[in-house]
Image (tube, grey):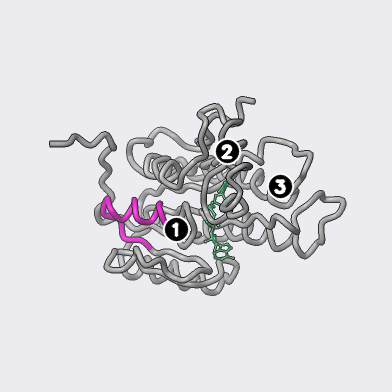
Amino acid sequence: MSVSTKPIYNFNNRTAVVTGAGGGMGKEICLALESYGAQIYAIDLKEQPIEYENKQITYFQEDITNYKFIDTLFDKAYNETGRLDYLANVAGVLLFDQDKSLVDIDMDVYDRVMDINLKASMYMTRKAIPLMLKTGSGSMVHFSSVQAYRGDPLPQDAYSQSKAAVLNLSKSIAMQFAKDNIRSNTIVPGMTMTPLQKRWENDNDSKDKMAEYIPLKRLGTPADMADGVLFLLSEASSFITGTELIIDGGILLH
Ligand SMILES: NC(=O)c1ccc[n+]([C@@H]2O[C@H](COP(=O)([O-])OP(=O)(O)OC[C@H]3O[C@@H](n4cnc5c(N)ncnc54)[C@H](O)[C@@H]3O)[C@@H](O)[C@H]2O)c1
């Protein structure tokens, strides 16, 4: 008999909204939450992942900056299940070829990155809070990046600034609603193999160099991030709010 070393969570009869659910991390997070019993309302621009078939996952192929639709999504989640327990703001974009120094960046590109990475997370949070208040508790995670903490000689200023702002979005909400048993924390991923990093797909050299630079000598995986999300949404972290869980293999130690 094999003994599982994974912690056991119980998300039975709990409702979660997850953005970026068609992406590398979002998909892993939805499947992990669902496997422990959660009912998921998921959104992404991409087509529904095949792995969601026959799962408790209601999937919407939509844009998270379409706020009218976001209203509908939260109404549906709450009306169908009578509660909202969790929010995972996972969706994000890094526009490699267009995101640059603030001195040079096209303002429309800057606005688009802010709209997706920051403003949509803010709107999702704003919609979630009243429903979590009605439910009597809640826990949420937002996705930042190690880029939020550092300058960069090859800047992607829109991305870095949006991800730094997410840290404060989470802290402010944590402070405002702790008295209502609503927790808010941020996951800070390091370099992780997902479609967002598709530049590495056929470039083993750069990938290996990056892995070598990371103290734990490997890139992150979506499962590394899902493990952090499960912990921060679950009761196992019931005394943790307004902080960050950095999951980066130690890269920020440099
Ligand atoms: N992969 C990394 O190395 C890394 C590092 C640090 C932070 N992050 C962050 O982690 C989060 C998850 O990223 P990932 O690596 O899984 O990338 P990913 O590209 O696989 O997933 C992101 C998902 O967001 C979706 N999305 C983007 N804009 C959207 C919109 N307007 N409406 C709906 N969906 C939209 C995309 O379609 C995509 O499926 C992101 O916020 C990202 O910035 C990733």
Q: CA distance from mark 3 to mark 1?
A: 22 Å
- Which of marks 3 and 2 precedes in the sequence? 3
**Residue at 30% across, 65% down:** 81
Q: In this rendering, is residue 77 above or below 248?
A: below
Secondary element at image label 1? strand
* Res. 180 in view: no
Q: Which residues are magenta?
A: 27-40
Residue 43 in the figure: left or right of residue 172: left
Q: Quadrant of residue 231?
A: top left
Q: Main secondary structure of the magenta part?
A: helix
Which amino acid type corresponds to the residue marked 1 in the rendered image? Val
Q: CA distance from mark 2 to mark 1?
A: 31 Å
Q: Amino acid at mark 3?
A: Gln
Residue at image mark 1: 18
- Identity, as a three-letter code, of the amino acid under mark 2: Asp
Q: Which mark is residue 208?
A: 2
| Residue 163 percent location from the top left of the image | 64, 47
Q: Nearer the viewer, residue 142 or 225?
A: 225
In this rendering, the answer to whether 213 lies above or below 190 is above
Please report whichever mark, 2 or 1, sits nearer to the chain's N-terminal start.
Answer: 1
Image coordinates for residue 17, horizontal then vertical, percent:
42, 59
Magenta stretch: residue 8 in it?
no
Q: Earlier in the sequence, mark 3 or mark 1?
A: 1
Tag shown at residue 161:
3
Residue found farthest to the left: 1
CB atoms of marks 2 and 3 within 8 Å: no
Count of number-bearing discs: 3
